[in-house]
């Protein structure tokens, strides 16, 4: 892993940006801001963008017109994970023409109700539909809401499902509830390490996407090392809205 951390700075910036899903998920975002955000992602040379379904069609049209080599990820049933599987599949199918990748929040209520068979059934159907249509699918496990035991079960389900990525969090978790069960918000190296251990134990090919509160290069190094992955977008991603901040921080390393 240190091979990647010790690259020449210019190469390192490109390598890090090359695994970033540049993210804009504020409810009050305007169409004008979405276009400016896409231009920003293109300048930073991120892997892609992550947006709400509302702007998927606009984003596809704009990216195509500009000729940007950006992938489009959209979040579904975000940030709560409260829809039944039929509705989740319907939403996916309605976006197939515009979207390259889907980030689904797992059905958290079923996780908290210990109904893991229903969670597994939902994940399986979504993976099947995504892959039949040539799409990448990630599952957000919202680490701030689950106990260690729930994490272990949930990670096993996602990583044994042939999902392309397991993703740490939405970035929208409620601090009060998270604190009440002793959890930190956002992506943590501890949870990423548990994901990596689960992937290795199961012989899974699932990648890891760290998202939620990733705002510094030091955090990225810590999370990347915990993941056991490389800066390869097929196996490791970063979901960040603070992409410019990290980019500028890394420039100062020169």
Image (spheres, rainbow, N blue to C red):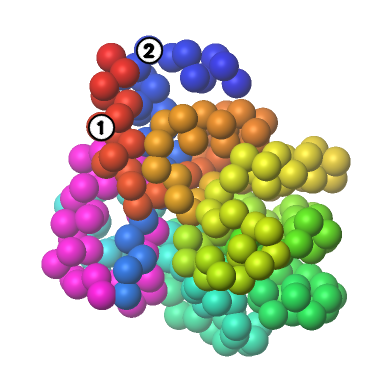
**Image check: 158 left or right of 39?**
right
Residue 244: give x, y in percent of width and height: 27, 41
- In the picture, the quarter occupied by the N terminus is top right
Assess whether residue 120 is covered by the magenta stretch. Answer: no
For residue 215, above or below residue 170: above
Question: Which quadrant of the figure has residue 177?
Answer: bottom right
Q: Residue at x 65, y 57 (%)?
A: 183
- Our reading of the magenta stretch's main secondary structure is helix
Magenta stretch bounds: 28-55
Q: Let me know if residue 112 appears in the view.
A: yes
Q: Earlier in the sequence, mark 2 or mark 1?
A: 2
Question: Which quadrant of the figure has residue 132?
Answer: bottom right
For residue 210, above or below residue 141: above
The crowding category of the residue bearing disc 2, from other C-alpha atoms within 10 Å (few below 14, some 14 to 19, many at least 20), is few
Question: Which quadrant of the figure has residue 34?
Answer: bottom left
The crowding category of the residue bearing disc 1, from other C-alpha atoms within 10 Å (few below 14, some 14 to 19, many at least 20), is few
Residue under circle 1? 248
Q: Let me know if residue 67 appears in the view.
A: no
Residue under circle 2? 8
Residue 175: give x, y in percent of width and height: 53, 66
Q: Is 50 in front, or is 171?
A: 171
Q: Secondary structure at mark 1?
A: helix
Residue 147: give x, y in percent of width and height: 76, 62
Residue 172: give x, y in percent of width and height: 47, 67
Q: Residue at x 38, y 70 (%)?
A: 52
């Amino acid at each position: 892993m240190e091979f990647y951390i010790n690259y020449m700075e210019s190469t390192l910036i490109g390598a890090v940006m090359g695994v970033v899903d540049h993210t804009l998920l504020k409810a009050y975002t305007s169409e004008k801001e979405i276009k400016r955000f896409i231009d920003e992602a293109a300048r930073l040379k991120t892997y892609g963008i992550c947006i709400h379904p509302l702007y998927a069609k606009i984003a596809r049209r704009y990216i195509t017109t500009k000729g940007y080599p950006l992938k489009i990820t959209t979040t579904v049933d975000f940030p709560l994970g409260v829809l039944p599987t039929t509705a989740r599949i319907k939403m996916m199918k309605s976006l197939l023409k515009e979207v390259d990748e889907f980030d689904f929040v797992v059905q958290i209520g079923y996780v908290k109700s210990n109904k893991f068979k229903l969670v597994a059934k939902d994940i399986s159907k979504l993976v099947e539909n995504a892959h039949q249509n040539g799409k990448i699918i990630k599952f957000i496990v919202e680490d701030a809401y689950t106990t260690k035991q729930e994490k272990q079960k949930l990670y096993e389900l996602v990583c044994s499902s042939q999902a392309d990525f397991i993703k740490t969090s939405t970035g929208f978790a409620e601090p009060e509830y998270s604190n009440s069960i002793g959890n930190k918000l956002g992506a943590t190296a501890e949870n990423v390490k548990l994901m990596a251990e689960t992937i290795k134990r199961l012989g899974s090919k699932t990648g890891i996407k760290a998202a939620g509160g990733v705002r510094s290069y030091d955090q990225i190094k810590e999370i990347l090392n915990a993941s056991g992955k490389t800066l390869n977008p097929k196996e490791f991603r970063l979901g960040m809205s603070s992409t410019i901040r990290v980019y500028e921080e890394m420039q100062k390393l020169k």
